[in-house]
Image (tube, rainbow, N blue to C red):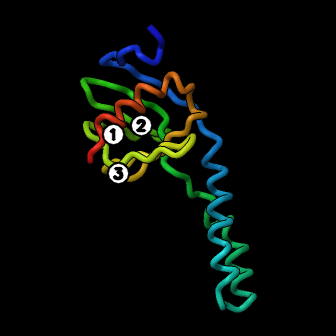
Amino acid sequence: MSAMSLPLSPYARIELSASRYPARLKWVAMAVTSIPILLSSLPWWVSGALLASLPLLLQRWCPMEVRALAMQDGALWVSNHRKVQQQLERPGRVLRLGPWLALQTPRGWWHLFEDQAPLEQLQPYYQWLWLNRQR
């Protein structure tokens, strides 16, 4: 029996490492935000000041990153680096695009990236999210 087809134990838990993608998302956010500033009809000095302040404005911005996943009694527990935990019996929207998974919870969007753990460890959780999502 392959590792992909093994049933998930009722008390499975996985600790995830930090991802390199949130830092890249900050650069993308700066690039996307700078385009409307440059194309606006603001005076050049206002546009320059806004562009110069973008790194400061986005310095503390960070997507809520999942750091631990736990399966207990048919529910999924997610927690972040601040040890905030949530229990999900039926997740809201689940978006998966390439190496990125976005999970809508009652407390907002949480993000999971494939570089945080091997795909073989994440696959059972992806399957649980797909099967239990709200339609």
Q: Residue at x 48, y 48 (%)?
A: 64
Q: Position of residue 134 (x, y in %)?
A: 27, 45
Q: Label 3: how many residues lie within 10 Å, few (<14), some (14-19) or many (20+)?
A: few
Q: Position of residue 35 (x, y in %)?
A: 67, 74
Q: Which residue is mark 3?
A: 107
Q: Are marks 3 and 2 in contact (CB under 8 Å)?
A: no
| First-in-chain label (3 vs 1) | 1
Q: Is residue 65 above or below residue 4?
A: below
For residue 54, side relative to residue 126 (left or right): right
Q: Which mark is residue 86?
A: 1
Q: Label 2: how many residues lie within 10 Å, few (<14), some (14-19) or many (20+)?
A: many
Q: Nearer the viewer, residue 103 or 127?
A: 127
Outermost residue to the top: 1
> Could you say whether the residue bearing mark 1 is in a helix, strand or loop?
strand
For residue 67, side relative to residue 60 (left or right): left
Q: Residue at x 36, y 37 (%)?
A: 130
Q: Is residue 57 above or below residue 129?
A: below
Q: Position of residue 67 (x, y in %)?
A: 49, 35
Rendering quarter of residue 127:
top left
| First-in-chain label (3 vs 2) | 2
Q: Which mark is residue 61?
A: none
Q: Are marks 3 and 1 in contact (CB under 8 Å)?
A: yes
| First-in-chain label (1 vs 2) | 2
Q: Which residue is mark 2?
A: 79
Q: Position of residue 23 (x, y in %)?
A: 65, 50
Q: Residue at x 26, y 26 (%)?
A: 74
Q: Are marks 1 and 2 in contact (CB under 8 Å)?
A: yes
Q: Is residue 88 above or below residue 124?
A: below
